[in-house]
Amino acid sequence: MNASFQKVETQMLQGTLQLTRFGFEQAMSCLFPVVIFASLALTQVIPLPLLPRYDWLLLICLGMQWWMVRSGLETKDELKVITLFHLIGLALEVFKVHMGSWAYPEEGFFKVLGVPLYSGFMYASVASYLCQAWRRHDIQLINWPTFWLVVPLAAGIYFNFFTHHFWIDLRWWLSGGVVLLFWRSWVAYKVGDSVYKMPISLSFVLIGFFIWVAENIATFFGAWQYPNQADMWSLVHLGKISSWLLLVIVSFLIVATLKLVKQKQPE
């Protein structure tokens, strides 16, 4: 009886240590997003000299990006991926603001068609998290589909964010395509010396949900504003989870494809 109790106690202790280690590594992977959220909160309550708030946020993001590369927390290859996400995100922001999906009501010198340049870093921070987590957890993909299926699916999901304003919304068809394409795909990741696995689709859902939670925090601190939040902040509609889920899928597919291409290149 005592031996069984000690065994359970040991397993619980090991599980707690693994969970703590996993949480720490996830927190380190989220440094860029944490800095953005902290900056959103602080710049809303601290008087800012010389420049509007949006421009200070841009300078903070640029400084954080420089420090992460300089300190070795991010590699130059990861910086290229993050820059690509910044451009992809900024293009989407310009279009969505033009269509009235949301707005950036505050003033700023560094704006493009009503969109502050710092906004692209919110997409880049997702890429930063994925790259950091990929390296820290030694991510391995199991039964990953062929490049010729993954790339068109990622492109279709991204362009649907634009085309659904003029044509039918294909998000549920595309979501079904994701389920079918990745039905047998898993992601393996390390926590310490132990290796764990989960279905790729589950990882998409989990990341998408937490980004929706982060979106509520961001809109609360005035990162951007949905039409229903113009007079008073309210919870972001649950339907947005599907949008973030698809955006996470695009992000993951781009990072995974670039990682696989890099692995196949000769040293």
Image: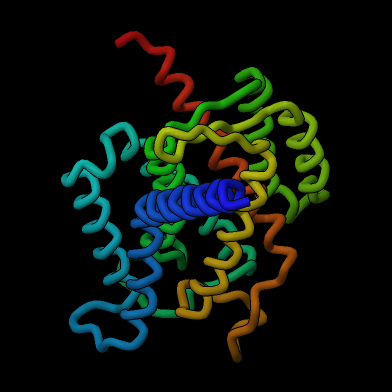
> Which one is in front, 226 or 2?
2
Tell me where residue 177 appears, x and y as whole percent: 78, 34
User: In the displayed structure, would residue 63 be above or below residue 173?
Assistant: below
User: In the displayed structure, would residue 68 be above or below residue 236?
Assistant: above
> Which one is in front, 227 or 124?
124
Residue 45: quarter of image: bottom left
User: In the displayed structure, would residue 262 be above or below residue 177?
Assistant: above
Q: Is residue 222 left or right of residue 175?
A: left
Asked if one can make out residue 90 in the rendered structure from this viewpoint, the answer is no
Q: Is residue 9 left or right of residue 162?
A: left
> Which one is in front, 6 or 253?
6
Residue 240: quarter of image: bottom right
Q: Residue at x 30, y 60 (%)?
A: 61
Q: How many marks?
A: 0
Q: Residue at x 30, y 64 (%)?
A: 58
Tell me where residue 154 appears, x and y as whole percent: 63, 35
Q: Is residue 210 left or right of residue 14?
A: right
Name of the residue lying farthest toward the top: 266
Asked if one can make out residue 177 in the rendered structure from this viewpoint, the answer is yes
Q: Quadrant of the C terminus?
A: top left
Figure coloring:
rainbow
User: In the displayed structure, would residue 23 be above or below residue 188?
Assistant: below
Tell me where residue 112 appears, x and y as whole percent: 41, 61
Tell me where residue 71 appears, x and y as whole percent: 17, 46
> Which one is in front, 255 or 196?
196
Q: Residue at x 68, y 23 (%)?
A: 149
Residue 136: quarter of image: top left
Q: Residue at x 38, y 64 (%)?
A: 34
